[in-house]
Amino acid sequence: MSISENLLRIKNNLPENVHLVAVSKTKPVEDLMEAYHAGQRIFGENKIQEMTEKWEQMPKDIQWHMIGHVQTNKVKYMAPYVNLIHGVDSLKLLIEINKQAKKWRRVIPCLLQVYIATEETKFGLAHDELLQLIHSDEFKALENIKIVGLMGMASFTDNNDKIRSEFQSLKDIFDYLQPYQLSNCHFQQLSMGMSGDYQIAIECGSTIVRIGSSIFGSR
Ligand SMILES: *Cc1c(COP(=O)(O)O)cnc(C)c1O
């Protein structure tokens, strides 16, 4: 199956309200262009330098999503163009994103990454840290970022019940936070689900799936 066939097969089976991020990390620009010509306009990368090189080379109607862990000192490279940062997990990082966004007179949309897996290695905020962050005065003063939702990753396991309960726990937090609205914070998007688990994620209420290997092949 070609990249465009993979893409269209997946896309045609997604519910209408679910956005597809084509995760193109490590893949060459030619592969991304094949997806682009098949209609894909949202691409996800996990390294800022690689994403910036691709942004420079590719058509300007593409939306670039940063899905990886973000180092504070690299935010400046993506600040002019990034459309959504999925993996925000600290106030310190938000303050830097806000500062860089201000230089470009932009508001950068972000998702807060929540820790839902039982694995030690997964990044993200615990539930209480998340609440503490969004209720802090420092957060409320940030005018050049907007929190538009949450992101999470389930454990890497073939136990579907475990994956489902982790996604469900994120959906519960999302539902709990939805009534909470500030000028820089409005929970509308829920980014969860990758190649191996996106169907479960959609059943649990995902609105953004991040799919790489099922489109572009294994890395
Ligand atoms: C690589 C990656 C994906 C896509 O993974 P696949 O299993 O290839 O679909 C999704 N989300 C994040 C955060 C990733 O790093």
Image: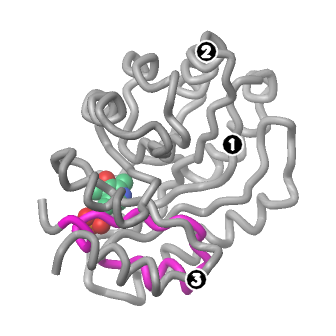
**Eyeballing the image, is 20 above or below 147?**
below
Work out which quarter of the rendered image holds the C terminus and state it: bottom left
The magenta span reads 196-216
Q: Are marks 2 and 3 in contact (CB under 8 Å)?
A: no
Name the quarter showing ligand 1.
Answer: bottom left
Q: Nearer the viewer, residue 187 or 64?
A: 64
The residue under the point 38% across, 50% down is 44
Q: CA distance from mark 2 to mark 1?
A: 18 Å
Q: Nearer the viewer, mark 1 or mark 3?
A: 3
Q: Which residue is mark 2?
A: 104
Work out which quarter of the rendered image holds the N terminus and state it: bottom left
**Secondary structure type for disc 1:** strand
Q: Which residue is mark 1?
A: 147
Percent x, y of residue 154: 40, 68
**Eyeballing the image, is 104 above or below 87?**
above
**Secondary structure type for disc 2:** loop
Q: Residue furthest front?
A: 37
Label count reads 3
Q: Can the viewer see residue 52?
A: yes
Indicate which disc, 2 or 1, sits on the residue closer to the N terminus.
2
Q: Which residue is mark 3?
A: 15
The residue under the point 40% across, 19% down is 77
Q: CA distance from mark 2 to mark 3?
A: 35 Å
**Eyeballing the image, is 60 above or below 191?**
above
Q: Are marks 2 and 1 in contact (CB under 8 Å)?
A: no
Q: Nearer the viewer, residue 40 or 94?
A: 40
Which amino acid lies under the numbered mark 3 shown in the image of this protein? Pro
The residue under the point 49% across, 78% down is 201
Query: Counting other residues with Cα less than 10 Å from the Cα at mark 3, is it few (<14), some (14-19), or many (20 or more)?
Result: few
